[in-house]
Amino acid sequence: MFNAWSRRDRPPEEGAAAGLEGFAVDKTFLSSLKGILLETELALTFIIFICFTASISAYMAAALLEFFITLAFLFLYATQYYQRFDRLNWPCLDFLRCVSAIIIFLVVSFAAVTSRDGAAIAAFVFGIILVSVFAYDAFKIYRTEMVPRAAQAPQQDIPEHLMCRPRAGPQALRGGWQTPPP
């Protein structure tokens, strides 16, 4: 009935870590495009945090907060732990993280450059680079994750006469959409 070793008191099993399979780092993710983008965002936010700490300490909270948010996303994606939270729309959360970081770093970077301090100007330059990295990440998320999901979504609740379809023939080269006749 009772073993000498309860499950909690057993020595760790050989091979993979017994209770930490969810925390094993996926090295292929870290070398993928998404992993490199997250690592770049993490490094640049840390550099901006250091620059703000050296010049204008009022703006360092934004960089530090974004550093921790990016670190959390890197951890969740690298360990595949995000898959346990299947009710969350992770591409949408990641897209919103990128868009909010773009807005925050644009505002903070342009506000910091007005001080004309050397470290603040460096934070401005790194902030603009970081905004471009976040914009590219948001673009990749939108193109690879959000658009295919919208195309795969069932459109059963939309009446046939309201559905839009791409134009066929030479009009398709000019772009645009057509609605079926009523």
Image (cartoon, rainbow, N blue to C red):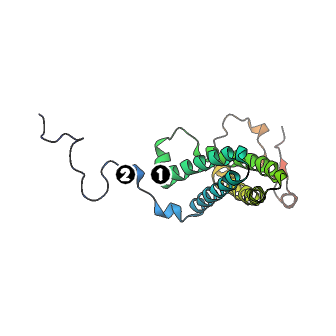
Q: Residue furthest bottom?
A: 31
Where on the picture, by quarter, is residue 153? Answer: top right
Kindly identify which residue carries mark 1. Answer: 80
For marks 2 and 1, the one nearer the N-term is: 2
- Identify the residue shown where x is 20% and y is 46%: 10
Left of 108 or right of it: where is 43?
left
Q: Quadrant of the C terminus?
A: top right
What amino acid is found at the position of numbered circle 1 in the picture?
Gln
Query: How many numbered callouts?
Result: 2
Q: Quadrant of the N terminus?
A: top left
**Contact check, label 2 and label 1, Cβ < 8 Å:** no
Kindly identify which residue carries mark 2. Answer: 21
Q: Mark 2, residues whose alpha carbon is within 10 Å: few (<14), some, or many (≥20)?
A: few
Q: Say whether residue 17 is visible.
A: yes
Q: Secondary structure at mark 1?
A: loop
Q: Name the one closer to the observer, 19 or 128.
A: 128
- Identify the residue shown where x is 77% and y is 52%: 109
Where on the picture, by quarter, is residue 159? Answer: top right
Tell me where residue 61 appears, x and y as whole percent.
Answer: 66, 44
What amino acid is found at the position of numbered circle 2 in the picture?
Glu
Tell me where residue 149 appears, x and y as whole percent.
Answer: 63, 48
- Identify the residue shown where x is 51% and y is 51%: 75
Residue 9 drawn above or below residue 42: above
Residue 27 drawn above or below residue 94: below
Give the Cα separation between the discs numbered 2 and 1: 10 Å
Tell me where residue 123 appears, x and y as whole percent.
Answer: 73, 57
Q: Which mark is residue 167?
A: none
